[in-house]
Amino acid sequence: MIDETGQQLGIMPPPQALIIARQKGLDLVEISPTAVPPVCRIMDFGKYQYQEQKRSREAKKHQKVIEVKEIKFRPKVDEHDYQFKKKHIERFLSEGDKVKATIFFRGREMAHPEIGRRILERLLGELSEVALAETSPRQEGNQMHVILSQRASRKSAPRAAKADGDAAAAGEES
């Protein structure tokens, strides 16, 4: 038996421990039921539960929830649309989200999955500096997809160096 200050009170029968806990206006909580003899503690159980909830809420605040954003392409995607969607993928990756790039086939387009595979492989090649493919392009039904995640954070350092270089070049021209 352990009291509210953390001192050991020794081994005692449960009714006696309950009497001590009630006299102090606290609860008797079984900490380790499998120990021989079982370990009990005198504490304010409501306050303990409240503090545990507070700790779990605090832990949730510091978590980063990673979302999977989806960008859909078609096999006959135009160059401008492709570049526009590629920029969206880069933005999503820089924000820390994962991206699922999907090629959606309709009708007779299903006969030529290599067209969709070429688009995804081109996308992987162009994004190789910022993105890492978690899966290889694979087809499921009338869709072919690949999941991209952000590469290790080498991206932020070159931006700063480039900005410093631009400032130095502007200073030289002045």
Image (spheres, helix red, strand yellow):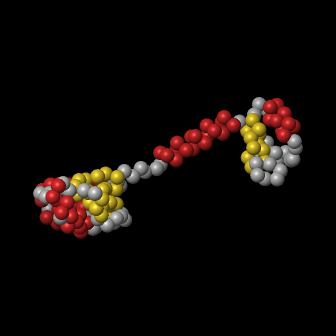
Residue 4: which quarter of the image? top right
Q: Position of residue 142 (x, y in %)?
A: 25, 56
Residue at 34%, 52% in the rendered image: 68
* Side (left or right) of 74 relative to 155: left
Q: Position of residue 64 (x, y in %)?
A: 43, 51
Residue 21 shows in this picture: yes
Residue 82 shows in this picture: no
Q: Nearer the viewer, residue 46 or 139?
A: 139
Residue at 15%, 54% in the rendered image: 81
Examine the rendered structure and indicate whether residue 163 appears above or below residue 58: below
Residue 144: which quarter of the image? bottom left
Q: Quadrant of the C terminus?
A: bottom left
Q: Nearer the viewer, residue 97 or 72?
A: 72
Q: Quadrant of the N terminus?
A: top right
Residue at 41%, 50% in the rendered image: 65
* Side (left or right) of 35 relative to 104: right
Q: Position of residue 137 (x, y in %)?
A: 29, 65
Tally the numbered discs.
0
Residue at 18%, 63% in the rendered image: 111
Q: Position of residue 53 (x, y in %)?
A: 58, 40
Q: Nearer the viewer, residue 23 or 78?
A: 78
Q: Nearer the viewer, residue 56 or 167?
A: 56
* Side (left or right) of 168 relative to 67: left
Residue 79: which quarter of the image? bottom left
Examine the rendered structure and indicate whether residue 46 appears above or below residue 34: above
